[in-house]
Amino acid sequence: QVQLVESGGGLVQAGGSLRLSCAARGNFFTMTARAWYRQAPGKQRELVAKITSGRSTNYADSVKGRFTISRDNAWNTVYLQMNNLKPEDTAVYYCNVLESNGMEYWGKGTLVTVSS
């Protein structure tokens, strides 16, 4: 059984920083990409940042220059460093894995709340 475990969410004031972690547990097939998505109340889930097996990255326009996605060498853990947080970053953040066979997995989410 595969599992994604997120951590690092919490309450922070605007302008502050948080670092999210996503640990992959179990026997995954070949992972081609890992990503962070978020869903704010009343809104659709959106892609925040993605990193591929080749370490290519892409970001939502709203977080460029403020958020950084990274991974450890073993591809077990992916991080999302979030700086200069804004109230509009408040959301539940979900970790995602895409395998080369097309399977996709999601974590349960971690809540990030940014107060003004």
Image (cartoon, grey):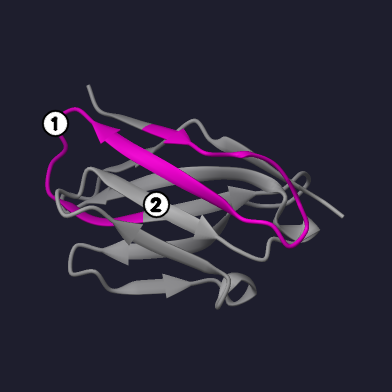
Q: Secondary structure at mark 2?
A: strand
- The amino acid on which the numbered mark 2 sits, given as a three-letter code, is Tyr
Magenta segment boundaries in residue numbering: 5-34
Q: Is residue 75 above or below residue 51?
A: above
Cα distance in 3D space between marks 1 and 2: 20 Å
Which callout, 1 or 2, points at the residue further toward the start of the chain? 1
Q: Magenta segment: does it hold 4? A: no
Q: Nearer the viewer, residue 74 or 52?
A: 74
Q: Is residue 75 above or below residue 110?
A: below
Badge 1 vs badge 2, beta-carbon distance below 8 Å: no
- Count of number-bearing discs: 2
Q: Name the magenta segment's main secondary structure.
A: strand
Q: Position of residue 68 (x, y in %)?
A: 45, 66
**In the rendered image, which residue does mark 2 sit on?**
79
**In the rendered image, which residue does mark 1 sit on?**
27
Residue 65 position by quadrant: bottom right
